[in-house]
Image (cartoon, helix red, strand yellow):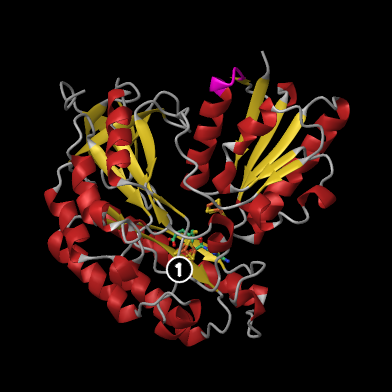
Amino acid sequence: MKRFHVTTFGCQMNEHDSERMKGMLTSLGYSESEQRDEADLILFNTCSIRENADNKFISHLGEAKRLKAENPERIVGVGGCWAQSVKDEVFRRFPFVDVAFGPGQIHRLAEFLNSDQLSAQGYFEFEDFAGHLPDHRARQFQGWLQISQGCNCVCSYCIVPSTRGREQSRDPGELLLEAERLAADGVREITLLGQNVNSYGRDLPKETRIRFSDLLGMVDAVDGIDRVRYTSPHPKDMREEVIEAHATLPSLCEHIHLPLQSGSSPILKKMRRTYTRERYMDRVEMIREKVPDCAITTDIIVGFPGETETDFAQTLEVVEDVGYDSAFTFVYSPRRGTLAADMDDQIAHPVKVERMERLIEAVQRRAKERAQRFVGRSMEVLVEGPSRNDPTRIRGRTRHNKAVNFEGTAEAGQMVEVEISAATSQTLTGTERLLSGIGA
Ligand code: SAH
Ligand code: SF4
Ligand code: F3S
């Protein structure tokens, strides 16, 4: 039996694409190999969001080259956003690559493997949704549901619109069937995926068009699904009904990831985010009013071209005001083919690094302060398995998406109540309540 090995870089979208690649390969009779050097088919699912994402993967490619030289029968495949973004040069720069494909062309891998193709092949067109592939989930009880692909936004720093194409929403009926299938297969937590989930539906034909909040209601109603999450919404499309849904739908978790990018309206304008600081803060206020305990997390970029000390101070102010439960912070990285990469007021690296340090300090301090509200409470935790640092303890997640390390006896996939005794900026600590097990 032939064996495959997949290395995944990048976001949840790529993780899900890799699960589908694995499902597809399994159905073709391949089995998964733990070790890359024992695989007949070596695959990389790549990301190109920042320069260090590119570099990380290119160092892995070196090993693939060596393994290919050792055994020329091996097949080396490169999929994902990096492959898409260098499609014209991939085979020239990396002649040992046998097959390359963009995020929308996963299914073509099967076509390639089934053919008697001897020369290298590339598949990069954008076409319909590449789903409809069996998936091979990392955890039985957690599943992704890709509700749309591509992105119609034009954020001036971002490579994604060019790697994933125009936005296309999937048919709601099809999504409902898939959610039901996941539930029947043991999934208790579903995460709806899209680059801009809350613009879902706008491109659907009138007869089937529904709004994102309606879709949330549909998935919430599926039997067996205890938790619904989604990522990422865009602040410009964050409507009141979606925020309200967090208060009314029992399975929709108390967590909203609301990417800020910058707290300065002039920088947001240059980023082409199409909202201002005021509009963003207005959304935050609405969340606080309707779902007071909701966790709010975000993405922030420092050192975007032209960012002054005053602009950066505004980002810090928003961080102080909102008090994020956590934030992904990124140093701006110029990406090929994007508008911002050609702006002539690029920020010097040491300035970016210094701002990043101040940003992280503020984010972590506020996150730690916010997390204290959980201490002394009993929280519902979906168990993920043994704790990473201490295998005698158990790890799981609250509905607020906080990681919890606790003492207890629960198994992966169970839902338990945990008494929280301490909180840092990143994790909660606690003890499992005996005789708990809500529905588990
Ligand atoms: N579609 C999602 C995710 C985009 S990528 C969204 O809009 O929220 C995830 C994050 O990477 C972005 O939110 C942004 O903060 C960051 N990012 C994207 N391009 C970047 C770049 N060129 N440099 C630094 N960070 C970037
Ligand atoms: Fe990129 Fe903006 Fe689209 Fe997100 S919304 S994927 S940041 S272009
Ligand atoms: Fe995701 Fe990276 Fe592509 S973040 S959408 S895999 S560029």
Q: Residue furthest top?
A: 1
Amino acid type at mark 1? Cys
Q: Is residue 121 left or right of residue 288?
A: right
Residue at the spot of label 1: 153
Q: Which residues are magenta?
A: 26-30
- Looking at the picture, tell me which residue is in the foreground, 374 or 337: 337
- Indicate if the residue with disc 1 has its beta carbon within 8 Å of ligand 2: yes
Tell me what residue is drawn at x 19 percent, y 53 percent.
246
Q: Nearer the viewer, residue 212 or 142?
A: 212
Q: Is residue 75 above or below residue 404?
A: above
Q: Quadrant of residue 38?
A: top right
Image quarter (top left, top right, bottom left or bottom right) of the N terminus: top right
Residue 403, quarter of picture: top left
Q: Is residue 77 one of those drawn in magenta?
A: no
Residue depicted at x 51% and y 27%: 23
Residue count near mark 1 (Cα–Cα under 10 Å), binned few <14, some 14–19, many ≥20: some
Residue 329 point in image, percent of width and height = 49, 62
Q: Does the magenta-highlighted stretch encompass residue 28?
A: yes
Whole-percent x, y for residue 239 in the image: 23, 65
Q: Nearer the viewer, residue 126 or 354?
A: 126
